Amino acid sequence: MYDLRRVTPASAVLSCHDRGVTDIAEGKLRVATRPARAIAVAAPRPAKAPTRAEAAGSVWVRGAFAAAWSAALGLGLLLVVSLILLTTDSRATASAGDAARLATQLWLVAHRSPLQVPGGMLSMPPLALTFALGLMVARASSIVARASRCADVRALGPVVIAVALPYAVIAAVLAGVVRSGTLRPSPGAAFVCAALVSGLFASLGATRGAGLGREVWQSVPARLHVPLQAAGTAAIVLLAAASLLTVGSILAHLHRFTSVVNGYAGAPGEVSMLLLSLALVPNAVIFGIGYLTGPGFAVGTNTSVAIGGSHLAAVPALPLLTAVPVGRAPWPVLVWCGLAVVGAGIAAGRRISRSSTADLRGRLQNAVVAGAALGIVAAVVTGFAGGPAGPGRLRAFGPSPWQVGLAIAAETAVVAAVVVLVTAWTGRHSRTASALE
């Protein structure tokens, strides 16, 4: 109870929404609270799940936009570089249309789309540029997969197709547009090559964007896990050894490299040759794998560059070709090549011995499978990195895919099998010694 005579006249009117006022008499006020009125809140209606047709339509729309964005970004960067090189050359008479045509042709060659030139064909891709364009496709497909909320491995297929197919169509259209009297790309070949390259990078990007890397790996048969891991370990060893061999050869012939660069009078020519050489460094690393594993590689028809000796004719004035070894490999290079081959096999064998739970026969089979898997991948990569590089003698450029694949498969399998046998024997000997003690 509250005495309001000291606060306000008895005739004061109190207004209250959530409380009631009762028994106003003699200046005394008794306030009784009452519960607030319940407010009925309607439950939100569940969002309507998109139908299968709507989901597929959204994936195709996103994939088309992603493919167009990737192609436009790659072409735009190449166009900027082409315009800079052409406009800074005072002797150049090319127009902006010529720069756009050059950028498109480089974009097609980066996907290994063959270009018909007078007297031959150009299809050897600069792998650094291929990898850069592929990263754009992977990034775009990652965004599409994340937006599409791919929940399982089967959902990745539509995303990859939705990105790769429009990308390949764009490549075919561009191949038909930039045809000229001297360079004639094939729209059909451009479609197939762009579909393969974009499909590979789109698969990697979609898997990463959806976070399904573990699920994709688990979808591979379990019996292949150990040999594939061993093949991957051996591949890392070979790539590292070939990279060091390539860099060492470039540094050893650096004076010849700089003299060839300086032979292109003017900054635009020198910069162009430097950029082209940098874009072809990954190709040189792949060629180095062919060199250190035995088959070697070719720099034109009827030529060979191998550790046993080199047979060369006149080579193009490309700065990177100054690093091609001449004559028989010196003994430090021979030792390095032997260590690389043996090291790759040892890495594969140790991985099989540590990871495999099979018996000795199963481990030996894993060694053979690891060598075969690595040989197949090496043959595919070698075939992609080489190929015709122009007319005339340049029709043959790079290692022989089947020779490199067969050599790597045999060397890796044999060394890995020996490591598995030695590991099994030492393990059995140590267990026997422990039992006797």
Image (cartoon, grey):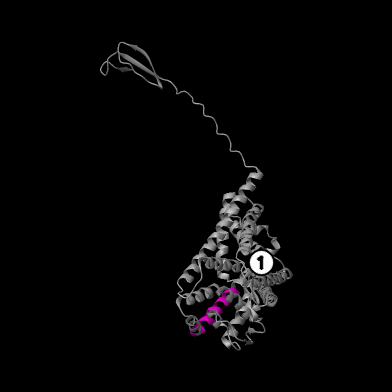
Span highlighted in magenta in the image: 237-255
**Observer able to see residue 23:** yes
Q: Position of residue 238 (x, y in %)?
A: 60, 75
Q: Quadrant of residue 115?
A: bottom right
Which quadrant holds the C terminus? bottom right
Chief SS of the magenta region: helix
Q: Is residue 67 above or below residue 123?
A: above
Q: Nearer the viewer, residue 45 or 184?
A: 184
Crowd rating for badge 1 (residues with CA inside 10 Å; few <14, some 14–19, many 20+): some
Left or right for 46, reference 403: left
Q: Is residue 358 above or below residue 312?
A: above
Q: Is residue 204 above or below residue 36?
A: below
Which quadrant holds the N terminus? top left
**Observer able to see residue 297:** no
Q: Quadrant of residue 11?
A: top left
Rendered residue at 30%/15% (across/down)? 12
